[in-house]
């Protein structure tokens, strides 16, 4: 399986993660996903009154230096880690 296929598989698995994962982890996944699928940030930072979009923009900007492949690999690793933590906490 190639990196792109594995990334797509784990993007689907990420949708099954519980809502109890931290906002930090959710934002990290968001930033890595956007970097892997879109590339570097192309928009201006949202205003102070739009905090949700501002946090998402900041998360994406934080991983901007990664290549598409690095972002995909890091995303897969993080989803695997969160799935393992979820499985461990439910057993």
Image (tube, rainbow, N blue to C red):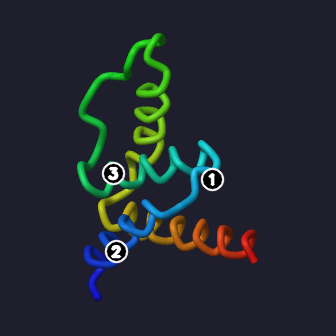
Vertical comparison of 42 with 46: above or below: below
State the residue position of label 1.
Answer: 21
Numbered label attached to residue 35: 3
Q: Quadrant of the C terminus?
A: bottom right
Indicate which label's residue lies in the foreground, 2 or 3: 2
Mark 3 surroundings within 10 Å by alpha-carbon count, few (fewer than 14), some (14 through 19), many (20 or more): many
Rendered location of residue 42, percent (x, y): 24, 34
Residue shown at the point (47%, 40%) measured from the top left = 59
Labelled disc at residue 88: none
User: Residue 60 at x, y = what percent?
Assistant: 41, 42
Q: Earlier in the sequence, mark 2 or mark 3?
A: 2
- Number of marks in the rendered image: 3
Depth order, front residue of 34/39: 34
Give the structural element (helix, strand or loop) at label 3: helix
Q: Is residue 47 left or right of residue 38?
A: right
Which tag, 3 or 1, sits closer to the chain's start? 1
Residue located at (37% from left, 22% from top): 45
Q: CA distance from mark 2 to mark 3?
A: 17 Å
Residue visible at 45% across and 70% down in the picture = 76
Q: Does dot 2 land on a helix, a strand or a loop?
A: helix
- Check the image and name the residue furthest to the bottom: 1
Q: Position of residue 69 (x, y in %)?
A: 32, 67
Task: Report the mark closest to the observer, 3 or 1.
Answer: 1
Q: CA distance from mark 3 to mark 1?
A: 21 Å
Q: Residues within 10 Å of mark 2 (few under 14, many from 20)?
A: few
Tell me, for residue 9, which label it has, or none: 2
Sequence-wise first label, 2 or 1: 2
Give the alpha-carbon distance from disc 2 to disc 1, as whole Å.
19 Å
Q: Report the quarter where the N terminus lies.
A: bottom left
Residue 75 lies, with reference to residue 91, above or below; the image says: above
Is disc 1 placed on a helix, strand or loop?
A: loop
32 is higher (above) or lower (below) than 50: below
């Amino acid at each position: 399986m190639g990196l792109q296929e594995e990334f797509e598989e784990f993007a689907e698995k990420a949708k099954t993660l519980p809502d109890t994962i931290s906002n930090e982890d959710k934002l990290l996944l968001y930033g890595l996903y956007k970097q892997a699928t879109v590339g570097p940030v192309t928009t201006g930072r949202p205003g102070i009154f739009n905090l949700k979009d501002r946090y998402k923009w900041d998360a994406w900007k934080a991983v901007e230096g990664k290549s598409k492949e690095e972002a995909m690999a890091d995303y897969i690793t993080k989803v695997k880690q969160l799935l393992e933590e979820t499985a461990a906490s439910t057993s």
